[in-house]
Amino acid sequence: MSIQTSARTVDAPLTTAAAVRLEAVVKKYGTGPSAVTALRGIDLTLTRGSFTAIMGPSGSGKSTLLHTAAGLDSPTSGSVWIGDTDISRMRAGRLAVFRRKHVGFVFQAYNLLPALTVEENVTLPLLLAGTKAEKSWLDSLIRAVGLQELRQRRPAELSGGQQQRVAIARALITRPDAVFADEPTGALDSRTGRQVLELMVQMTRDLNQTVVMVTHDPAVAAHAERVIFLADGAFVGYQDGATTQQIADRMATLGEK
């Protein structure tokens, strides 16, 4: 992975192909003197099979970074690549179709459709794309997230952790280039949240899945291989294999207790 801080570039060996790449990404909201710059020339490369957490004080740009990298928002300048595709200049309709196949999303609110079963919620991206699920892949995926006995239940019949597992399976069903997670454990108790995070670690190890996660919780971030820190829309450093306390100490220097 290579990241650009406000003062320097920090490089790490690139052992596999890039799943996500941002080049000189700037994101501004508004125009003129009142414009707000949320991202300031971000350079970032995430390799396949990596698990990266993004942290920073409130207003640091971490959610903007996640949304821009995932194609939910467009950069003001610079480019965003998912796999070998530059999504920065895609028209909205084409981008939506691309995201459906190549990008997975896991959010704090599970965003499941209450009238659909577990299996139907998992396969929804394929239904929207007009394709059918490969049975062996669907079966193995539902088994991997521990929902094989719950396939025909509806969201109201599931616990919060089970609903988040459905959301994770749905994010994986298209075998995307990357899965983006925004506070994925924010609505869960600590034990259930830990189980969900362990599942995400398993995704990177067993499926070679790239995961990018925004969180404000050092204990959550400690499950990632690398934690990247933002402040004022720019990278200010990173830690590999850090403990909860090490991450919390770093966050304290950025002004977030």
Image (tube, rainbow, N blue to C red):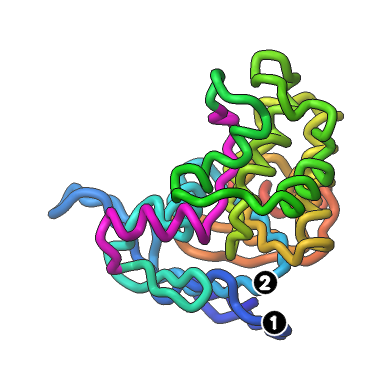
Is residue 61 visible to us here? no
Q: Nearer the viewer, residue 144 or 59?
A: 144
Q: Nearer the viewer, residue 223 or 159?
A: 159
Residue 88 percent coordinates (x, y): 33, 67
Whichever of callouts 2 and 1 sits on the residue coming sooner in the sequence is 1
Q: CA distance from mark 2 to mark 1?
A: 6 Å
Residue 230 percent coordinates (x, y): 55, 57
Residue type at mark 1 is Thr
Say which element carries label 1: loop
Residue 199 percent coordinates (x, y): 81, 46
141 inside magenta stretch = no
Q: Which residue is mark 2?
A: 48
Q: In the image, which disc is placed on residue 16? A: 1
Q: Nearer the viewer, residue 233 or 130?
A: 130
Quadrant of residue 115 in the image? top right
Task: Report whether 38 appears left or right of 254.
Answer: left
Q: Residue at x 64, y 25 (%)?
A: 117
Residue type at mark 2 is Arg
Is residue 170 visible to us here? yes
Q: Residue at x 52, y 61 (%)?
A: 102
